[in-house]
Image: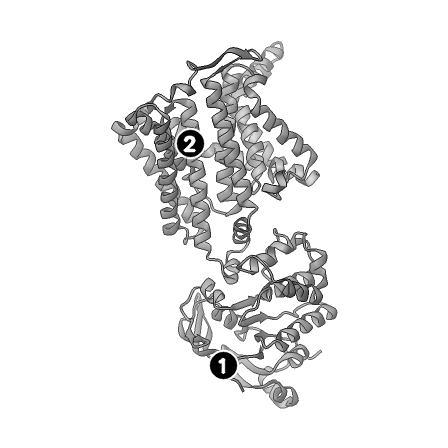
Amino acid sequence: MSEPLLTLEGVHTHIAQYHILQGVNLDVPKGGVTMLLGRNGAGKTTTLRTIMGLWQASQGKITFDGQDITRLSTPDISRLGISIVPENMGIFSGLTVEENMRLAVLSGKIADDRLDWIFSAFPPLRTFWKYPAGNLSGGQKQMLSVARAVAEERRLYLIDEPSKGLAPAIVSSLAKAIKDLKRDGATVLLVEQNFSFAKALGDTVSVMDDGHIVHSGSMAELAQDQNLQTRFMGLSMETA
Amino acid sequence: MLSLISHDTPRSKILTVILLAIGIGLLFAPFLFPGSRSMETAARIAVFIVLVASYDLMLGYGGIVSFAHTMFFGFGAYGIAIASDTLGRGFSSLAIGAIAGILVSAVAAVLIGLISLRVRAIFFAMITLAIASAFAVLVSQLSTITGGEDGINYQIPRELTPAFKLMSAKIFDVSVNGKLLNYYLLFFCSAGLFLIMLRIVNSPFGSVLKAIRENDFRAEAIGYRVVIYRTAVTSISAAIAAAAGALYAIWLRYVGPGTALSTEIMVDILLMVVIGGMGTMWGAVVGATVFVLAQNYLQPLMQVAVDATKPLPLIPQLLDPDRWLLWLGLLFILSVYFFPTGIVGRLRKNG
């Protein structure tokens, strides 16, 4: 296994009076897709938001490529080369698809080959390029959310449940886009509830429960071991 | 031509006609509507278009609620007044006063922004209200510099006063004098400032502002430092408000708390933004025009209505010109009820 690009050591996060992350230890190897699995409320989204600085870790250390980013502000973390696709998509409804995309590239100019790849992965974005993003369907909004995160090459992509509530055809196109990223050597930390989606994409896996990492290993190992799946994830995982 | 400056075109035929009518009306106001009262009204409309648009830059695009906008307007106006009063009449005094007012305004906005834009919107609004009130008290108390409650009367260059005749002949029965030059100085500067704002809101900077207004956490996650952007737009908006104040001070040749700092002006700005439509520069044009026209002509119109309805019971009393503020208030309530997105928002929806 390659050296970790991102490391969380004993990370705790409190949100108001709630103690959500209770000492998370997680390694995300450089290159490849790390799946973060677990039941609802296990702390997966909080982990992504804490890495991004959207919620501050109250204790512990987060290291990205050797640099301590625990106390950095969100824009500074983003500028180090980390992008996030949030669970609620977080698109700017009042702006056009084009404006949403351009905003995601701090230089304001999306490379032509990158844009071609995005249009081939998500054709509706080309069709609705000049339209307000608020007019897109739910699946198209998710495409835009993912496309925005990958609009320029980043060193780490944090993606939160991209397949949630989407039609199978759209899930397939999202999976293909993430496979393309993986093929190009990108590092992805992907939160997912859909086990089939996770199996198809993941290289390594960490399973969360009650604010802790309870299992880490290879995705292939977890995919083959029914006992491990039942033990760590119960019956709440969608296997379809 | 407009698309070179901005992609935010009117997007409604009726709105385009209204905007053209306002633009042409203001451009030829001295010839189309001769008389000092109509010229005063046209100048006030032009200044308030800039002032309201600069406020909308902050509120409608940046999502920032501030009650200190008249203070920035006042910085520009008092800059002209104090410079002309102390340095004597002359274009250099006007330039020094305007530049000083704009710079003080921009720097003050940066300081206020950096200190208070990290707090929640309502607290920022309260902080700006407190600072503006403190500034108004300060202006009132520093009477040796500001003229206190009486304000300052000062002289502007002779070339901008009615006493200066550019030519002896009249054009369309209008004297070509310094007052006309003063009007066109105000008009073209206002138009220039408005076009600059139109460009700003349609630049990448404007897109970031709109993104921050919609979801500031998301904008931060993309890598934009929200406080920096909010502070920048507050500063730009304050500088433009100060420029509007300077133009108005050159036009009026008098500055006092009532013309440049009062709470009434702040309320008027808010009403103009809401009536015209928030988050669109065109809204400032329509809102300021409708509001200033109502302010200036509602009373005479009501007198006409009173004369016409004299034989009827009650109605002449209700339409008494002294009750014009009541009717202005009712007009505002009706416009908010029927045009919740402002006149421009409504026209665009229909268009």
Disc marking residue B245: 2
The residue wearing badge 1 is A4
Q: CA distance from mark 1 to mark 2?
A: 58 Å
Q: Residues within 10 Å of mark 1 (few under 14, many from 20)?
A: some
What amino acid is found at the position of numbered circle 2 in the picture? Gly
Where is residue B113 shown, x and y percent of the image?
Answer: 40, 48
Q: Nearer the viewer, residue B55 or A38?
A: B55
Residue A151 position (above or below residue B333): below
Q: Nearer the viewer, residue B272 or B226?
A: B226
Residue occupying the point 36% across, 26% down: B256
- The quarter in which the N terminus of chain A is drawn is bottom right
The chain carrying label 1 is: A
The quarter of the displayed image where residue B331 is located: top right
Q: Residues within 10 Å of mark 2 (few under 14, many from 20)?
A: many
- The quarter in which the C terminus of chain A is drawn is bottom right
What amino acid is found at the position of numbered circle 1 in the picture? Pro
Where is residue A117 shown, x and y percent of the image?
Answer: 67, 67
